[in-house]
Each structure stands twice: as structure tokens, then as C-alpha cells.
Image (cartoon, grey):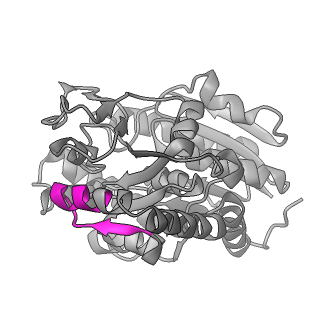
Amino acid sequence: MRIVVTADTLGGVWTYTRELVTELVRRGVQITLVSFGNIPDGSQCAWMEGLKNLDFRPTAFKLEWMRDSEEDLRASADYLLGIVHEVEPDLIHLNQFYYGALKCDVPKLVVAHSEVVSWWVAVHGHEPRPDDWISWYREVVSQGLAGATMVTAPTRWMLDQVIHHYGRPASTAVVYNGRNPKLLNPHLTKELSALSVGRLWDAGKNVALLTQFEPSVPTYIVGSERHPDRGRDGEISGAGWSRIHMIGPQSEEQLKGLFARTAIYAATSRYEPFGLAPLEAALSRCALIASDIPTFREIWGDTALYFRRNDAESLRDQIAFLISDPELRSSYADRVYACASERFNSQRMAEDYLNLYQILTPAGALVE
């Protein structure tokens, strides 16, 4: 089976792509990977070393959620179409909406990782007010979804958001994201500390909620404090408190160590189509305290402890509650680890996608 896969290099989609492509290549799938956003650096590409049947085509074309991206998107669609004509794949796996409208006869699977309108509703409580850009964005997303042979999403909640805002695509499926458990460490002795990962200015991830109170244990926030366009733009009212440590972006190896040592992970999101960082924490055997939003309930069920959405006091109280009860904290850590290992691993994700590929390809193209 030969597949063209698109990705972007600016966030969690790159991690998702790495996990999926690695597993597919190991199963004999031939993949041409085309990336958009920024040209990835050496550390972002290290995972490709030694992988056979992988042809990587990096580009710096802008992404569809970026303003003033129309010209880049048209150019990147022409570039991608040229690759399709060159490679003659059995299927195109698209991690952006825009290319679902690509004019070709190859089956197109579009993955709805995230989406601007549903993000806005989750953060602001209403849809974005119409302007030229949001009207353009809605139109290109609608065209991409309409042109897709199948649309998938990493949770039922995210798929329902796509259907609500854009109508039901021709064919749909839910494929939960996965991580390779071997890349995380669940075996270290835990320190009495809490951790959260997210850019401080990202109102959807909402890690700034942790700065609104003095926590009962040292609490580490991993991620940029500065918005790329506007400088510092996070709510950091409690940044001077002694137990709050904003440590900025970390390498993958550094983050692995933080997950391994930390007792509690705080998943603070108001908007979350899936949440790879909470999954990495779960695979590191961190007890999970999660915002009470539909996505986290869908994924983690009763293996996580929940706090009221966007409620700093509720989050503070739940952290203190778990810290005060070592036996309960250990129980939650073990339960969420078992859930993550069994349900949200990269092998299961790849197998689910391969099943869909077999359905979508004209003659059920075989993995070689």
C-alpha cells in the first residue's frame, strides 16, 4: 500500500504523525510525508532515521488557520497534487481540511484534529462574529470536508463539533490518538509535585488557571509565556508565588523526565479535541486531574479526577485532595496508566487506520 500523508510541524499533529507513520512503515506501508508550517529542525526529524519506505518532503507553506494564508494554500495544493501524480498513491491521509477539496481520483481521508469555530465557542461561549477571514475559513473547511471520501476525528466529541458547525460528511469514523508507551517512563519514584503543559497565552489549553492560586505542592508549567505575535499574553496573576515554576518549552527528553518524576498532571483545557500531553502523563503513571469537559470524560472516564471547568478553586482543592491521600493518588495513577496503555497506544491507532484504508481503497489495497 502506498500513501501520501500530510502534516504540520507546529504542534501536536507532528507528534501524532510521527507515531502513526512509524507504525505504518513498520507494517510495510510506503509513505510519502509532506509537511507544512515550518521546516522541521534536526530534532524534529530524528525519528525518521532508519525507517525504510519513508519519503519526506518538507515545506514552509502556511496553514489554513493562519491569516493571509490563501496564496500559500493555493500553491501548496498545486505542489501536493504534483506529488500525487508522481507517487500515484492508493490513498491520501490529510491532516488539514483544505486539501480535502484536492481535484484527484484518489480516496482522501481528512482528519479533524482541531477547528477554529469550535475552539472559539469553547473559549468565548459563542461563535466568532462574521468577518472576511472567518467567512473564508468556514468556506474552505466546508469544501475540504465535502471533498473528503471519509472524515475522522480523534474523539466523538470533536467529530460531533465538525458535524454541528459544517454538516455531516459523506462518511465518518472516530480513531483515538495513540502514543508508544515505550517512549515514556512509568517506573520512577514520584515527587510530590504537579505539572501542566501548554502555552500560557493559549486560552483553550488554559494552563494560566494554575497561576490563580498558591498550590499545595510545587507546580511546573511547561510552555511559552509569549504569544508569537503579541509578546507576553497570558494571565500570570500568581507568577510570583513560590510554588509556581514556569519553566518554558522543554525538549522531549526533558519533558519525559518531568512526567516520570511528577505525581499529578493537571489537564486544564477548556477546548480539547483529544489531548496528547495528558496521555503522555498517563503513560508516565501520573495521577490525572482533568477539567470536566466532554473530551476528557469520553477518554478517561472514571480513571481521572475532575475539577469544574475553568474554576481555579476547584482545581486547587482537587490537587490538595490527592496530595493528602497517597493511597488514593497511587490508585488513580495506576488506573489511568492501565487505561492509556491498553486503549491509547500507537499500535492500536495504526491498526484502526489500516482498517479504514482497506475500506477506502478501491480494491482493498494490500499492505506489502
Q: Is residue 241 left or right of residue 1?
A: left
Determine whether 110 is above or below 297 in the image. above
On-image quarter of the N terminus: bottom right
Say which of 115 and 85 sits in front.
Answer: 115
Q: Quadrant of residue 224?
A: top left
- Give residue 293's position: percent from left, percent from top: 30, 68
Q: Is residue 117 shown to the viewer in this render?
A: no
- Give residue 245's position: percent from left, percent from top: 32, 31
Identity of the residue furthest to the left in this view: 129
- Give residue 164's position: percent from left, percent from top: 29, 74
Q: Is residue 97 left or right of residue 87?
A: left
- Tell me the residue at 33%/44% (across/down): 217
Residue 306 is covered by the magenta coloring? yes
- Tell me the residue at 37%/27% (across/down): 248
Determine whether 343 is above or below 104 in the image. below
On-image quarter of the C terminus: bottom right
Q: Quadrant of residue 329?
A: bottom left
Q: Is residue 157 left or right of residue 342?
A: left
- Tell me the residue at 16%/57% (across/down): 313
Residue 78 is covered by the magenta coloring? no
- Give residue 357's position: percent from left, percent from top: 69, 67
Say which of 166 and 158 sits in front.
Answer: 158
Tell me which segment is drawn in magenta: 304-319
Determine whether 42 is above or below 185 in the image. above
- Tell me the residue at 16%/44% (across/down): 212
